[in-house]
Image (cartoon, rainbow, N blue to C red):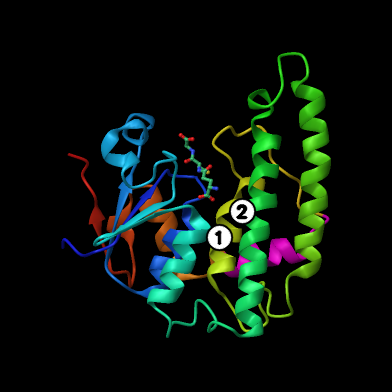
Amino acid sequence: MKDQPILFIIPGACSLGSQITLEWLKIPYQVGITTPEIRQSEQFRKINPAGKVGALKDGDVVVGENLAILLYLADKYSQSSVCPLPSSNDRALIYQWLSYLSSTLHPAFQHFNYPNRFVEDGYADKFRELAEARLLGILQYLNNNLSESGFFLPTGPTIVDGQAYGLLRWCKKHSRGENLVDLTAFPKIRNFFALMERDLAVQNALLIEQEQSQMLKDSLFAGYFEFG
Ligand SMILES: N[C@@H](CCC(=O)N[C@@H](CS)C(=O)NCC(=O)O)C(=O)O
């Protein structure tokens, strides 16, 4: 039990991609659902000093930032199909897309969903309008670059797709609810959603987020981590 990886998450957050990857890897793991109080605690800051999810504790290894967690898992389970081998062109594409998702797509959603974090009262509506235009440009770029397999790499699903799904789902459903994005103009993204949502690992990860683990199928999920 002690050596099972524990992934720290917030339901609905960017940690979903790491959780989908743990499901794809078919390994036993636990999930720690965090609250604002937990994320501010000394116990959690030892796992991720930034106080954010995703964060992973795997034995003596602790790592924060989804991009880093995904690459850590890819290195540790290097025989898995979730990530191509180092030094290959496909592996380089993994770096390219993970980097784009975390440096460009994720902040674009934050600007769109939380304008008040970035500008003073009175400017938020205009800021959100600009943020929406930028987000739509990014979605167009992603739509145009999904490969013929329907995923980001022509070879099939990888850690990039797990992470992309965890972020792109904010187009359809967000905890704040009101800022949904019309995907009519992005058929390849809609197809990507359909492919991902058909995947048992994705369905399992969503059930675990919703604390409905009794409905899991073919998962090695080992239970919820209890904070002491
Ligand atoms: N660059 C970080 C971003 C992490 C991040 O912003 N996580 C959000 C959820 S999407 C979070 O933990 N929010 C809770 C908080 O700020 O208290 C990553 O990709 O891991």
Above or below, comparing residue 227 to residue 18 in the picture? above
Is 192 magenta? The answer is: yes
- Please state which of residues 60 and 155 is positioned toward the viewer in this rendering: 60
Q: Position of residue 161 (x, y in %)?
A: 59, 67
**Residue sitting at 59 percent across and 44 percent down?**
173
Residue carrying label 1:
163
Q: Position of residue 177 (x, y in %)?
A: 60, 34
Q: Earlier in the sequence, mark 2 or mark 1?
A: 2
Which residue type carries mark 2?
A: Ser
Which residue type carries mark 1?
A: Gln
**Residue sitting at 68 percent across and 82 percent down?**
154
* Distance CA(mark 2)–CA(mark 1): 9 Å
Quadrant of the rendered structure where residue 193 is?
Answer: bottom right
Quadrant of the rendered structure where residue 107 is?
Answer: top right
Q: Which residues are magenta?
A: 185-196
Q: Which mark is residue 102?
A: 2
Is 2 magenta? The answer is: no
Lateral position of residue 171 relative to residue 225, left or right: right
The yes-or-no answer for disc 1 within 8 Å of ligand 1 is: no
Quadrant of the rendered structure where residue 20 is?
Answer: bottom left
**Residue sitting at 67 percent across and 67 percent down?**
96
Dot 1 crowding, Cα within 10 Å, few <14, some 14–19, many 20+: many
Lateral position of residue 175 relative to residue 11, left or right: right
The yes-or-no answer for disc 2 within 8 Å of ligand 1 is: yes
Q: SS at mark 2?
A: helix
